[in-house]
Amino acid sequence: MTRAISLHDVSKSYIRGNRVVSGLSLDIEPGEFLVLLGPSGCGKSTVLRMIAGLEEIDEGELLLDGEWANDLLPADRRIAMVFQNFALYPSMTSRDNIGFPLRIEAPGEDPRSRVDATARMLGIEDLLDRFPAQLSGGERQRVAMGRAIARHPTAFLMDEPLSNLDAKLRNHLRAEISGLTRKLGVTTVYVTHDQAEAMSLGDRVAVLRGGVLQQVGTPRSVYSLPRNVFVAAFIGIPRINLLRGVVRAPLDGAMTISLGKQYLRLPEPLCLDHQLLRVQQGREVIVGLRSEAVRIAEPASARPGEVHITGLVEHVEFQGHEVLVHFNTGSRPALVPDLEAPRPAPPVRRRRRDSGSVLERLRHRAGTLRAGPVVALERPADDALDPAPPEGRLPGDLIVRTTPDFDLRHGMHVPLLVDLAHLFVFDQHGDRICPAPARLPDLEE
Ligand code: ADP
Ligand code: MG
């Protein structure tokens, strides 16, 4: 048995006036694997805990299979949760850890056969008589999974179950979780801050920022049509290049987007998405170019839709099968505040007396996480070069992926071709305007 989980306009505050989840609506289908993705502190665990019944819902409703479930006791929800820190009882063997919830649910029954069947499924039969201290991290997480599975839950909630494991094991267990949940056909809500994990696991990915849902869709759709700058920047490696530009749409000439010292000339005839940019004339926008939208090549080899710019090599990142080249193109990067590495805070000498109450500190902490503007455009773009690279980013404003065959060194000027079929443009608020969010219906149809 599996179940549908719906959240309708759900909000939650721990401290009055500070919503950590705000107006969240999500419909998760029976058997679906949905990933909740977002940076640390954006409210992912809170959402999961509300679904599990471990946290009260302040506003809005939770429906399980269409039935109102806000007040349903956790034990009556038949939902199993798997946590990041494995959460096993240290004084119990794996067998007892897995069997424990079964004993609670059905005190008279012997859980042995169900524990054995679960252990077989997870390949942990030989670990059943060991205590948690005698298990590796990966083994502990398998036992924790076993405990969740043995109950035959109608849904799994997994809260960053792999983040305490090393990279290799994480990949391995990721594949295992995917296989297992599909085999069991049980609805799964999986929380992570790791976009690669989200993209590889989810049937759909729901991106959260500051407690607010930004977008929900298949991994392919959130990558190829991000609704705003935050989603565009959060998903995809290397991070999408975000440059500050200005749309120039003269009545008698070609339309361009100027990027500081250079410009992108939009190919004629203008496609519909580019035509719609005309209304931005004179305004500052954010140009988004994923690394696959730019290649190193001479202008003469441009294909239709490709335009030429030049980049100064600032840094070359050798990665074996590919090379990431950081170019300076004379444009200024747009910052996405939640995603830049935080500046190191100046050391604060704290005396007990002035450190404030716990409540005040919590309030301050929650306040700093409120969903402010998606993008920081603090100064209007001018054509001057901003010499200081933003905090937390390597030098260069445009990162291009290439093969190791190019012998590129710091200081070289290199011709680049930008494929405008892959151009993203976001407005000043960070919302995507190209490709157009939703075109107006064609009146002639
Ligand atoms: P995530 O799982 O995305 O990292 P959480 O849901 O754990 O985020 O937390 C969201 C916000 O709520 C954070 O600012 C966190 O500090 C705050 N928070 C979480 N739990 C509590 C709590 N029990 N009391 C007060 N604030 C909390
Ligand atoms: Mg969390």
Image: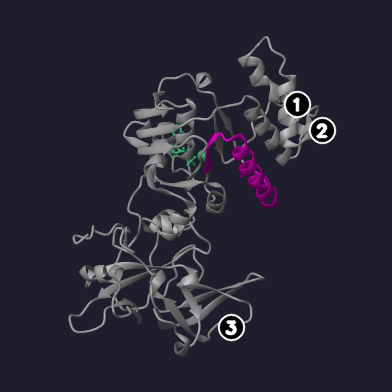
Q: Amino acid at mark 1?
A: Asp
> What is the x, y in percent for residue 250?
20, 80
How many neighbours does mark 1 have within 10 angstroms: few (below 14), some (14-19), or many (20 or more)?
A: some
The C terminus lies in quadrant = bottom left
**On screen, residue 320 above or below 102:** below
What is the secondary structure assignment of the residue under circle 3? loop
Give the residue number, with chain letter if any, for mark 3.
409
**On screen, residue 365 above or below 258:** above
Task: Tell me the magenta residue range.
Answer: 163-191
Q: What's the CA distance linking mark 1 and mark 3?
A: 59 Å
**What label does residue 126 carry, if any?**
2
Ligand 2 within 8 angstroms of badge 2 C-beta = no
Q: Judge by depth and name the residue closer to the eye, 162 or 219.
A: 219
Q: Is residue 143 left or right of residue 337?
A: right
Give the residue number, with chain letter if any, for mark 1.
116
Q: Is residue 421 left or right of residue 36?
A: left
Pick whichever of labels 2 and 1 is earlier in the sequence.
1
Pick whichever of labels 3 and 2 is earlier in the sequence.
2
C-beta proximity under 8 Å, tags 2 and 1 = no
